[in-house]
Amino acid sequence: GDNVTLVVRKNRGEDAVSVTYDPVELDVNNMKLKFPHEMFINGKFVPALSGKTYETINPATEKPICTIPVAAKEDINLAVRAAKKAFENGEWKQMNARDRGKLLYKLADLMEQHKEELATLESLDAGAVYTLAIKTHVGMSIDVWRYFAGWCDKIQGKTIPISHARPNRNLCLTLREPVGVVGLITPWNYPLMMLSWKMAACLAAGNTVVHKPAQVTPLTALKFAELAALAGFPPGVINIVTGSGGVIGDALTNHPHVRKIGFTGSTEVGATVMASCAKSNVKKVSLELGGKSPLIIFADADLEKAVKQACGAVFFNKGENCIAAGRVFIAKSIHDDFVKKLVEETKKYTIGDPLDRSTAHGPQNHKAHLLKLVEYVQKSVDGGAKVEIGGERLDREGLFFPPTILSNVEDDNFAAKEESFGPIMCVSSFDDDNLEDVLRRANSTEFGLAAGVFTKDASKSLRVAEALQAGTVFVNTYQKTDVAAPFGGFKQSGFGKDMGEEALNEYLQTKTITIEY
Ligand code: TAP
């Protein structure tokens, strides 16, 4: 189609500038969808320097959507240079904190105006169920931009009573300063939401950013770049570079001018990222990594609610969910009946086209992931688990794997230890009278992202919540995250928080100023 020209009005009566892009145009989901398919560097949509591209695939059809640039180290260098310049000299640096907040609010408003397009793109590129994408992938992204927009002019230091150098007096104060150029690397499960959780806090703190979305799901990040340009972010403040983690993710984590990496992804890659940050220039780093979150259901729970929530805890977003309940422990006295009810509930999930408003369960994100799920079930069954429902790829177009329940998952089974990152519930029973034992089993994992407990006994729920080694514990609910509540893991699920006031700390450094008078 014809190039799209965005006229960007600047804040203080400055000249309007325009940003042009070569659009992909699709007639889909009852709308005319237009979006960029090139990277966004220094305020412009550009191809890779090499000119190389790859195709991003729709998992509901396994057909290509459009081409995307394959960036290399040189492209990362350009983006970092632009971000460094924007951080050190530009309009961004001089901007009042309150005006920075206005920009973030404006971006959130634009995201809201374009939320159907963003949700449609998330559905096409990631297989996200459209109705869920509106609420969660996009809805929570908008919320997090607004939440951090409000923080911009509330980032404050302290005045501290230090000892005086008598006869003189001393005053000590602290400034909370941005760290500089930040690299953000995100996975494919919630592409826009992972970008937003990190970037909103990062920009609220006054940094500039180079973001690398996951290779298999770049589209919402590029549409986001269009909206950021429209909102009037100065060139270089936000840069989005597309390509492979092994090449450009690595270049970003090793770059000498990047001062902080915010990473969400697997524990294995997270460890590599941390090592690169250390070796290159001792970058600050925060890691949101894998999980194998236990969910414990006691016999005295509201069982009807627990059945629904347990299914949601595992099958939400096709199981492509970092806090998905990776193990479900059910009290022996209710186990058999509870599993029957889980199977009944699971049968209610309508599987289909993610854009269809009646669909509850869409295709898995990409092919390699789907194949791993098939293998996951095989290995667990070989280890003695029983398939109660599901377990095999569906015989239809697209990358569909049904909600699956494995019971009889013993502690040494593959499925008791490894994260599936898919819609596979791994059920074990526990002795009603031995609280210590189920807590020991729930904690016997190197992960510590989330955990859940269902019981009507208030003191038991608090004792269990205290004992569970996880960054987030849900009591009589699951999956209830909020942009105002800090989120992040313990143990090998990483460190550093997204969301809530605490997330700002990941993108700030404290300067202590001591004055004598
Ligand atoms: P990874 O393979 O770790 O990929 C995450 C990101 O890192 C991708 O953008 C990837 O690029 C990039 N990457 C790969 N190798 C890299 C390297 N050497 N240096 C720098 N970056 C590199 O994870 P995944 O398979 O996409 O995501 C699934 C995992 O993420 C699961 O373990 C899940 O639990 C975790 N996760 C955690 C959370 C939270 S909040 N804790 C949220 C979502 C997901 P490519 O595009 O080339 O792969």
Image (spheres, helix red, strand yellow):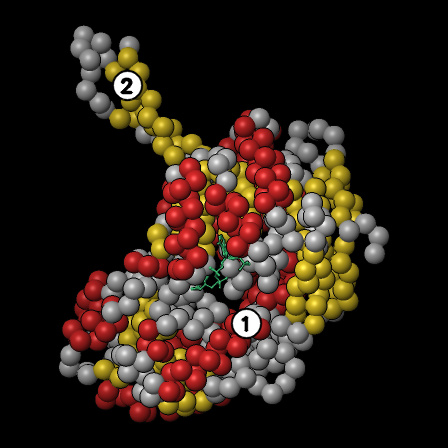
- Taking the spot 26% from the left edge, 62% from the top edge, the residue there is 469
Percent position of residue 433, x then y: 15, 81
75 is higher (above) or lower (below) than 420: above
Local SS, label 2 = strand
- Taking the spot 70% from the left edge, 42% from the top edge, the residue there is 44
Q: Which residue is mark 1?
A: 368
Percent position of residue 396, x then y: 63, 85
How many angstroms separate mark 1 from mark 2 (CA)? 59 Å
Q: Is residue 21 left or right of residue 265?
A: right
Q: Which residue is mark 2?
A: 171
Local SS, label 1 = helix
Of residues 514 and 89, which is closer to you in this image?
89
Q: Is residue 217 left or right of residue 498?
A: right
Q: Is residue 263 left or right of residue 367?
A: left
Of residues 360 and 321, which is closer to you in this image?
321
Label located before the other in sequence (1 or 2): 2
Mark nearer the viewer, 1 or 2: 1
257 is higher (above) or lower (below) than 63: above
Q: 10 Å neighbourhood of mark 1: few (<14), some, or many (≥20)?
A: few
